[in-house]
Amino acid sequence: MLFHELAFLYVFMPVTMAIAIWAGRKDDKSLFIYFLCAASLVFYGWWNPVFVPLLVMSIVSNYFLGNFLVKSRDASRKKAFLFLGVAANLLVLVVFKYLGFFADIIGDAFSAKPVVLQLELPLGISFFTFLQIAYIVDAAKGETVRDKFAPYFLFVTFFPHLIAGPLVHHRSLISQFSQKMTNATENLSVGFTIFVIGLFKKLVLADIVVYWSDAVFNGAANGVAPSLVDSWVGAISFTLLIYFDFSSYSDMAIGLSKMLGIRLPENFNSPYKATSIIEFWRRWHITLSSFLRDYLYIPLGGNRKGQMRRHVNLMIVMLLAGLWHGASWQFVLWGGLHGTYLLINHLWGSQKLIILPKLVGFLITFVAVVFAWIPFRAETWDASVLVLKGMIGLNGIILPVHYEALLPSAAAHALESLGVTFSALTVYGGLTQLISLGMLLVFVWVLPNTQQIMGRYDVVLEKRAKPVPIWMCWKPSIASGCVVAVLGAYLWMLGLQGKAGEFIYFQF
């Protein structure tokens, strides 16, 4: 079920919130937990009920394994069962997500074409698998307790984060389920406002750029080489699209949780404002970065075994981060690019080279991120190459045909002598399009983000967003209530049209 589809907006959300808030205000939270467990299974099974048993089996097996690891005092047995548990979780992930990819690699190596059963990818499998790997690892380290089954079940299935995160830690979420709900009215108003902001990003802002992005990348997938202008329009459009898409999901997940009196971790903190690639990864998909640091980078040795080993560990983590996003060399390339960026960033800092002005660092970081998004979005290596060549002018520099009449003849001839041609463009839409892209860039570069706007309230765990002046923060009033109500009504009507597609991160 999608947060912006008809069934969720008009049925699931109001019914679930009404019952859960009523149950959550009771001294005994058992009904609250049981109801949300059932509601979350309905939410997950709405897309394809066939995968509900897989989710339940994963939860049951990891729960009992975690309890065994907590109780066990035999270090060798604990280590063996932890290895088996992690391997079993990864095996399920490999079977559903990576089997075809690995089979293709083996087939290419031996010039064969292995026959592999093509399985549909269960929604959110990477997320709920990683959550539970973290749980059993912490159980083996003695960093968790024997939780009751229902709270653990809800920790994994809690519908706001089940499909696309954030990757919330068990310690920070399970304990909240047993706390009596207070300030229900404030939670509802604040959470609903955050949800509406996220819905606006998805149904309005993301919708502006999705067609420009698709036109360039789908054309490249079919062998159409985009020109310089079209390539940059498509690349910037996707850069904005994935920002609004992922930011909107993060906002809606936090808003829905807040309405239920639950705080999730902040997962998105204006990453395009970063002045270095290191800072970018502290702002983009924050919970995934934390997970990879705690459960992969540090166990590999982190930075404790010398600079060279640190760089190797960092590259391994980023390559696996790319592979986590999808079973394709395109995603591995994306991870490799970001790994390379991070190595350059660290080397630049360690060698104490010239300190770049923040504006220069910001521009270099943004352009580097834009280029890295190309293989992330392109369907094939050939499509990536076509778009990348277009961005550096190797596919030709074409200006709209009517521009020739606006230029002095000498200037037009000079441009033509440099290889510039005047012809029709497939994606570039003129001044209106440039103004739209410019305004959206201002939105992500300048305006405060959702967590800053909601700075008066305790909305997320471990606030990371830099506070803004209090006058810029939202507060409940008749005026703000009317704005949220009107905007919400408009967005609910857009939901009836069913225009927006799935969230990009649903495929992971």
Image: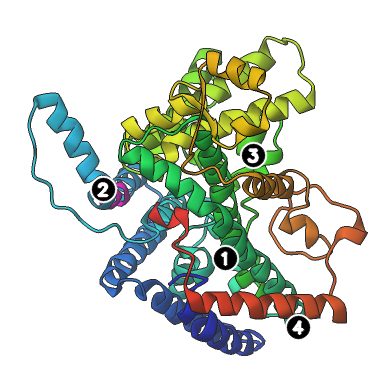
Mark 2 and mark 3: Cα distance apart in space: 30 Å
Q: Secondary structure at mark 1?
A: helix
> In the rendered structure, which amino acid carries the disc numbered 2?
Leu
Residue assigned mark 2? 91
Q: Secondary structure at mark 2?
A: helix
> In the rendered structure, which amino acid carries the disc numbered 4?
Thr
Q: Position of residue 436 (x, y in %)?
A: 66, 50
- Which one is closest to the eye, mark 2 or mark 4? 4
Crowding around mark 2 (Cα neighbors within 10 Å: few <14, some 14 to 19, many 20+) is some
Residue 388, compared with residue 172, is above or below; it is: above
> In the rendered structure, which amino acid carries the disc numbered 1?
Leu
Mark 2 and mark 4: Cα distance apart in space: 45 Å
Q: Is residue 171 visible?
A: no
Quarter placement of the N terminus: bottom left
> In the rendered structure, which amino acid carries the disc numbered 3?
Arg
Q: Nearer the viewer, residue 504 or 282?
A: 504
Query: Between disc 2 and disc 3, whose residue precedes?
Result: 2
Q: Is residue 437 visible?
A: yes
Residue 175, compared with residue 275, is above or below; it is: below
Q: Which residues are magenta?
A: 89-94
Query: Between disc 3 and disc 4, whose residue precedes?
Result: 4
Crowding around mark 4 (Cα neighbors within 10 Å: few <14, some 14 to 19, many 20+) is few
* 116 on left or right of 88: left
Q: Position of residue 316 (x, y in %)?
A: 43, 27
Residue assigned mark 3? 282
Residue assigned mark 1? 203
- Which one is closest to the eye, mark 1 or mark 2? 1
